[in-house]
Image (cartoon, rainbow, N blue to C red):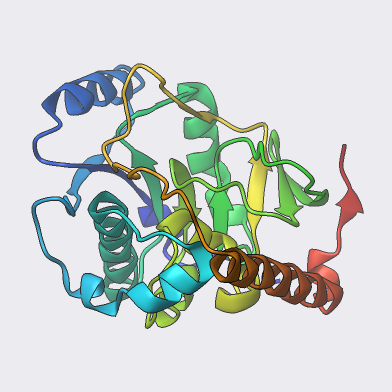
Amino acid sequence: MDRLSNTSEISVLVLTLRDSVDRQARIKKALDQGGIEFEFFWGVDGRKEHHPLMDCYDAPKRMRTKGQPMAPGQLGCFASHFNIWARSDSENKSFIVLEDDVVFDEIKLKSFLKIAHQLPAHFECLRLFENKTRNHKRYELAEFGQFRVLRFTKGPMSTMGYFITPQAARKFMATTNSVFLPVDIHMDRYWVNDVVCLGLQPAFVFHDYEFESLIGYGSKESGRTILTRLKRELFTLSERLRRFFYNFGLSEKYRGQGSK
C-alpha cells in the first residue's frame, strides 16, 4: 500500500487576515504552549482585495442554483484556501490547515502529526473536526494510532481544520474554473473534484464562538420567483443524484464498515 510522500515535512498553517491581530495572538499562544510549530498564512480579504480566482466567479450560475449572489468575503475565503492549495502543489507538500478562529486539542494534534506518515496515499484530505451535518452516513476505513479514519457520505460544510495532500490540492484547483459555491461546499462536492470526503474520530479541532465570522454572508434575498426556487430545487436534486451514483461506484478501498 502506497504511503504519503514528504510526510516528515508536514507543516501547520494558520489561515488569517493581516488585520486579525487578536485572533493571531490567541491561536499563537495556544500553539506555542503546545510546542507546535506553525506558520501564519496570509489570506485574501475579499472585501478589500482582488484575487485572480474572483474572475472565475460565475454570477449567473450562482443565481440559477442558489438565487442569491456570493458575498465578497466568501470569494476572499475561497481565494485564501486556493492559495494554500497552490502552495501545496508547488512545494509538493502536505499541510495541516487551521483557521484562526479555532481551538484544538493539542495532545491529539501532536499525535496526528506523529502518525500522518502511516496514512495511505489515497487518503488525500481529512477534516479534523466533527461532521455535524444531518442525514449523513459514516464508514470506518482504517485505524491509525488512536484515530479512526471515516468516510462521510455528506460533507461537513466547513474548512476550519483539515489535512491536505498535494494530490487533493491539485484536484480542488482543477475544478475551480467556475466558482459559484463557497469553498467548503466546493471541497464537499467529492463527486465533482474526486477527493473522497474523509474525517477523523476523535476529532480535535473545534470552532471558537468567541469570534464572529469575517466572511459576511450577506442578507438573504426575499421574494424569489417560482422559477428561481424551481431551479434551486432541481440543482439540489441533481447534486443528490450525482452523489448517490458516485458513492455507488466507489472502489473497495473506500467501502469500509458502518460506524455509529
Query: Looking at the image, which is closer to me, 241 or 188?
Result: 241
- Residue that appears at 45% across and 24% down: 106
Front position in the image: 122 or 129? 129
Q: Would residue 63 be found to the left or right of residue 18 on screen?
A: right
Image position, residue 214 (x, y; %): 26, 37
Question: Looking at the image, is 162 positioned above or below residue 69?
Answer: above
Image x and y of residue 123, in percent: 62, 62
Across and down, in percent, residue 126 comes to 57, 52
Report if residue 25 is visible in the image. Answer: yes
Q: Is residue 29 above or below residue 128?
A: above
Q: How far across and down, in percent of the image, does residue 210 sit?
A: 35, 16
Tell me the residue at 50%/45% (across/down). 158
Q: Is residue 215 above or below residue 69?
A: above
Which quadrant would the N terminus be assigned to in this image? bottom right
Q: Nearer the viewer, residue 10 or 24?
A: 24
Does any portion of residue 166 appear in the rendered image?
no
Position of residue 225 in the picture relative to residue 79 (left or right) = right
Q: Residue furthest right?
A: 258
